[in-house]
Amino acid sequence: MMALSPRAGLDSVKIVQAASEVADRHGAEAVTIATIARKLNVRPPSLYNHVAGLRELKTMLAVHGGKQLYHSLKQEVGEQQGEEAVLALGKAYIAYTRAHPGLYEFTLRAPDPEAAELQEVASSLLQLIIDMLGTYHLEKEDILHAVRGLRSILHGFSSLEQKGGFGMPLNLDESLEYMLTSYISGVRNGGQQRDTEK
């Protein structure tokens, strides 16, 4: 049987872009080789010239989404520090999940140890938050707890919002700022307590 030749103009970048659009429009579970092939108007085997399979495509989406998220957060935080930085990062995070709800889902799982590029993206995101929290003088272990806490707040808020879990007639952005301010207060108190114990 004659091997299929790669379709002209089709490459991994276009495949990831198409998959991102499918994910954001229909949800992460809608991303399959068949659905992406239909969107690109090609036969499924054509994708395998550029992507090894669905698992690799999901990893590529996680890398793509993670890079987008990192650059969005980095840009909004800028040179800000302390409370202003945390508020800027939190608002940018939620803005990203609102704009890319499906793609965001691919960024949530702990990265595959064998996926070097995904590990690098995850490390960049982690380091960005660690650097931002450096002004609160937390011990190393406490910083990691604080990172988990912030991630839990932001993901929980995003998940509930996307699933229609906020039914009360109350401004969501004001609720987000309230939660972030409360989080900042807790982190600041933790750092001050450490300083007094020394």
Image: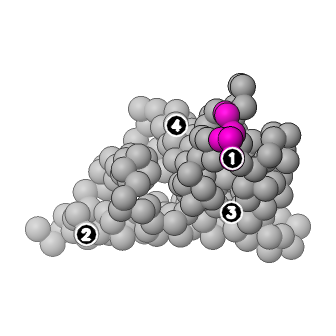
Q: Secondary structure at mark 2?
A: helix
Q: Name the residue at 56% across, 67% down.
A: 153
Q: Which residue is mark 4?
A: 71
Task: Name which quarter of the figure residue 112 lies in.
Answer: bottom left
Q: Earlier in the sequence, mark 2 or mark 3?
A: 2
Q: Is residue 129 something that shows in the picture?
A: no
Q: Which residue is mark 1?
A: 1
Considering only vertical position in the picture, is 113 above or below 197? above
Q: Name the residue at 81% across, 54% down.
A: 35
Q: Which residue is mark 3?
A: 158
The three-letter code of the residue at mark 2 reads Glu
Which mark's residue is nearer the viewer, 3 or 4?
4
Q: Residue furthest top?
A: 9
The three-letter code of the residue at mark 4 reads His
Q: Which mark is residue 141?
A: 2
The three-letter code of the residue at mark 1 reads Met
* Residue 113 rendering spot, x and y as whole percentages: 36, 62
Q: Secondary structure at mark 4?
A: helix
The three-letter code of the residue at mark 3 reads Ser
Other-residue count near label 2 (Cα within 10 Å), few / some / many at <14 / 14–19 / ≥20: few
Q: Give the extent of the magenta segment.
A: 1-6
* Residue 36 rendering spot, x and y as whole percentages: 77, 49
Other-residue count near label 4 (Cα within 10 Å), few / some / many at <14 / 14–19 / ≥20: few
Q: Nearer the viewer, residue 93 or 84?
A: 93
Residue 3 is inside the magenta segment: yes
